[in-house]
Structure formats: C-alpha cells, structure tokens
Image (cartoon, rainbow, N blue to C red):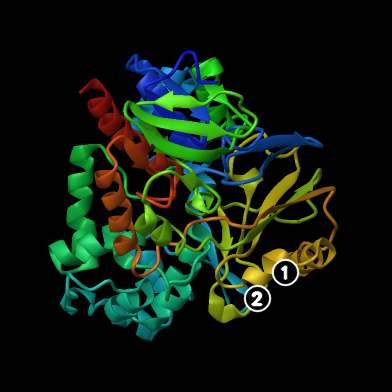
Amino acid sequence: MSDQHPAPVAVIGAGITGLTLAHLLDRQGIPVRVYEAQSRPGGAIRTSREGGFLIEHGPNSAQDTTPLLHQLFAGLGIADQLEYASPAAKNRYVVRDGKLHAVPLGPPALLGTRLFSGAAKLRLLAEPFVRRSDPDQDEDLAHFVERRLGREFLDYAIDPFVSGVFAGLPEKLSVKSAFPRLWELEQRYGSLIKGAILGARERRKRQDQSKQSAQSFSFREGLQTLTDALVRALGDKVHTGVPLQVLRKTPEGFALELANHPEVVRARAVVLTIPAHGYEGLELGFDCTAARQALAQIYYPPVAVVFCGYRRSPLDHPLEGFGFLVPCRENRQILGSLWNSSLFGGRAPEGGLALTVFVGGSRQPEHALWPEDKLLGVVADELRELLGLRERPDYQALFRWPRAIPQYQVGHQRLMEAVEACEVQHPGLYLGGNFRGGISVADCVKSAHVLANRVAGAVAG
C-alpha cells in the first residue's frame, strides 16, 4: 500500500537539524513529513524535571552565534522564554596541578595567570611570525596549535577545550574541518592573533559572533523548549517510532519503507538527517557505496553524563562560573564539570546546587562504559578532590551516550567529498546532520537553512 497523501519532501530524523529543516520548508508551503526512528523527537536534546532540579540529558546550552537563531525563536513564539547565561558564565576554569585556575579573559589576566608559565606567555609573542601551513595539507589540531602557540598552550588551553566541545582529542581532529575558523585565520591573515583582531570587525558587520565570545543561552524550561516548539509547529507532520528500513528510487523520486508504518511513503526529495552510524542497517536500492564507506569511518566516542543535585549547597563558597575542564596531562578520570545552577535560574531549588560531570569521550572511552556504581564513585572522588564536595547528592542521574559526538578527524573533508558525490549522483537525495557543517545547535540551524534552500529550489524546479 502507498501513502495516499505523498509529500514532495520526506525528512528522516527528528533532531534539531531535521525539525528545523522541516519547519523552514513548511513555512514556505512545501509539503513535508518527518520520520523519526525513536519514540520521541528531539534527538540529543532532552530536558526533564526531577526532585526540583531541571536536568539536561544531552547538551546543556547553546551559543548565540547567528541571527538565524532569533528568527527561528520569533517564528516559533518562544523568544520570550529565552534565557542567557548569568554574568558568572564568563568565568571558566581549567585544572592544573590538581587546582582550578581561571581562564584569562584578556591580556592583563593572561600576564598574571598561573595557568601558563612565563615561558609559555613569551612563546605567544612569536605567533605572528610563524609561517602559514600548506593550504592543501589536512593538519591535525594538536600540530597546528603547537606549531603556532607552543606545547603548553596546547596542553592547558586547547586540549581541555576540545574535550569540552567534541569530547575529542586534538591529535585526531582536523583543524580544517573541526575548527575551520582557526584554519581560515591562519590562511587569510598569516596569524591567529592578527586575524582575531581584524576578524572581529568583519563579524560585527555580518552581525555574527565568534564561538569564543558568543553568549550561552537556554530557555527557562531547558533546551527541549526549542525542539518541542518545532514539533508543535509541525503537528501531525512528525511521525515517531518509524525507523527507515529501505530507500529506493522511483521514476517520480523515492519510495521509503519504514518499520511500524503500513504504507510505502513516496517523495520527490529525501533528506537524511540521521547520524553517520544510522546508515549501517539501511537498505538502499541504488549505489551509494563510497558515501556509506565514508560515513562508516566517522567515529562517535561514548560519553557518560552524570547529574548531581543538592537541595542545599554543601559548599561554604558559591560556585560562580561556567564550570571546569580537565587537561589530559592531569591524568584524572573525568573530562570536566558544568555548573548548571550558576549558569541559569531554576536549575536547582533556592539555595541549592546543580552540576553535571562528563566522563569518557575519545580520551577515555572505556570510562563511559564503567558499571554505574564504579562510575558514580569515581565522579564523587573527583568532585571531592577538585571542589571540596564531600556530601552525597540529594539527587543523581546517569545518562549514557554510546555514540555521542561525531569526530571531524584528519581526512574528514575527503569523507564529505564522497557524501557530496552521492548527492550529485542521485538528485533529490540530501545527506545532512551534525557530522557535516558543525556539531553545535547553532551549526545545525545554519545547516538546516542551507538544506532548506537547496531542497526548496530543487522541488520548485
């Protein structure tokens, strides 16, 4: 049996990219349907309230890097629920020699910080005189940073930052693919320092923000506010619990066979916004071998997320800041901690404390898979040593992401070329998701806009 009301566009995957894309097409009057394998939409974004605490199972915040976000919020009617991080969020910490050190926010703070040695600070002065790399070389981030800024800056600035953003390793990530802005600064200006100064002026003209200076935001009831609003706007166009099993080409476009869905879905265009590993069990009725082989090479490390909530803070001092990150050289058992109740209101009862600890990633993937009692015990030990937290939380939750964040490793650009070739070979087929175009919420919204323009043009034509 075939779908009696076929839509020109079928979107596979109801994460932030798929939902935003479908919403943009719907607003243009293009019939669209969204099909999600899981029982709930939203992808990695999920918020819950337990015991007086607001808990994020996946990402805890997003960054205000593009006006497209505000256009989306206004169109969904949720702009009044937007909440920016508190001023304390500018305070970020990195562990060195077992103690928390504030990340310097400017040249005066850099001169006075103990996070970096005097020799490391002097090394930064040489950065404008370091030669550009070969633009055809796909350099790993560690080599790039050590070459331009020195080893200590790599160890105590970039390494912890990468573990916080990608749960990744700078030795593995491609600077060109994972941090294209850094690569562009070197290629265009010949210097990161010079480029940061001149690039800031250009961003102001575009009304964009750098990811380093952009404000963090969420919503009063958490990030799921956004995906819930998208689902409400799309209404019955979103179908859940229907994994795509078979995708075939037809003279009119495509035919889709989905589990738990009695009808064959027909569409002129199909947009896949599933993770790279989501293609493993998918049967394709046409040749896309090179792209599938490329996607199979994208690594997603496991990450364990541990939420700790205290109805009354057991500390004799407030935690005022975004949180802390742990460099690899410190040889500790966690990647870092985010201080939820310092960032946003309503995350804990009045006078309470809420924080989230991250374990595993590419650095220590086996740690994310530890038995629950061992993992929670290690987290308790680390928080006691680093923050002085000696009491057990009033509420604690563990969320495991067996395949958390796609790693844009050296060679990623070549993999994406195979994906692009598949799209060229099969007009009407589009492959999206956060393995392409960036991993952040803002990146996904930008990617959705790019996809919407491509799809709308093709369907209209």
In the depicted view, which residue is nearer to us: 456 or 383? 456
Q: Residue 327 location in percent, x, y?
A: 54, 73
Circles 2 and 1, Cβ within 8 Å, touching? The answer is yes
SS class of the residue under badge 1? helix
Question: Is residue 69 at all visible to an observer of this figure?
Answer: no
Identify the image quadrant of the N terminus. Answer: top right
Query: In the image, residue 422 lies at what x, y percent?
Result: 31, 49
Q: Amino acid at mark 2?
A: Arg
Residue 230 in percent (x, y) is at: 50, 24
Residue at horizontal 53%, vertical 60%?
300
- Looking at the figure, which quarter contains the C terminus? top left
Q: Which residue is mark 1?
A: 382
Q: Residues within 10 Å of mark 1 (few under 14, many from 20)?
A: some
From the viewer's perspective, tell me whether residue 195 is left or right of residue 308.
Answer: left
Q: Is residue 264 above or below residue 132?
A: above
Residue 10 quadrant? top left
Residues 192 and 41: in front is: 41
Which one is in front, 119 or 438? 438
Q: Which residue is mark 2?
A: 332
Which residue is depicted at the point 56% across and 23% down? 263
Question: CA gap, disc 2 to disc 1?
Answer: 8 Å
Crowd class of label 2 (few under 14; some 14 to 19; many from 20; radius 10 Å) = some
